[in-house]
Image (cartoon, grey):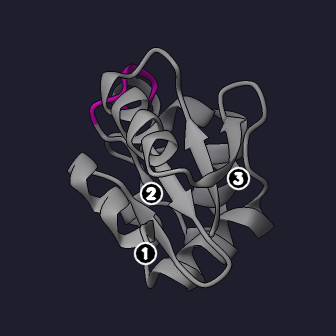
Amino acid sequence: MRVKIYHNPRCATSRKVLKALQEHGMELEVVEYLKHPPTPEELREIMRKGNLRVQDLLRKRDKVYKEKFAEAELSDEEWLEAIQQYPSILERPICVSETHAAVCRPPDRYREFID
């Protein structure tokens, strides 16, 4: 199975999930989302595949989130644009296959992608 992982190499949880997927021999596409933020279209696809809400994608402990968005009441589309503009507010890691997506918190959620 091919899995795309939206990864932050500075995050211990993200590194743990990446390592576990590698150890299971998964075919991986690693996207360092801070350098290459997902587009709103990609985020909508993640939400569709994972039956997620935009709020599920937000990293509310992030400094930028706390400073700029903690009190914000944005539409889903405005949140998707905000994530693209400020990718650090995207929760991590996110794994996506052809048919499924999940925010891997807790990190054991990677098991959903193991055949």
Q: Which residue is mark 2?
A: 57
**Of callouts 3 and 2, which one flags the residue occurring earlier in the amino acid sequence?**
2
Label 1 element class:
loop
**Residue 12, image x, y percentages:** 32, 22
Relative to residue 4, is residue 67 depicted above or below?
Answer: above
Q: Which residue is mark 3?
A: 81
Q: Are dots 1 and 2 in contact, CB under 8 Å?
A: yes
Q: CA distance from mark 3 to mark 2?
A: 12 Å
Viewer-side residue, 36 vs 64: 36
10 Å neighbourhood of mark 1: few (<14), some, or many (≥20)?
few
Label 2 element class:
helix
104 falls in the magenta region: no
Dominant secondary structure of the residues highlighted in magenta in the image: helix
In the rendered view, does 97 fall on the left or right side of 13? right
Q: Are dots 3 and 2 in contact, CB under 8 Å?
A: no
Q: CA distance from mark 1 to mark 2?
A: 7 Å
Q: Which residue is mark 1?
A: 53
62 falls in the magenta region: yes
In the image, which residues are magenta? Answer: 61-65
Which residue is drawn at the image coordinates 68% and 39% (left, top)?
30
Which residue is drawn at the image coordinates 52% and 20% (left, top)?
9
**In which quadrant of the rendered view does residue 57 lie?**
bottom left
Which residue is drawn at the image coordinates 51% and 41% (left, top)?
22
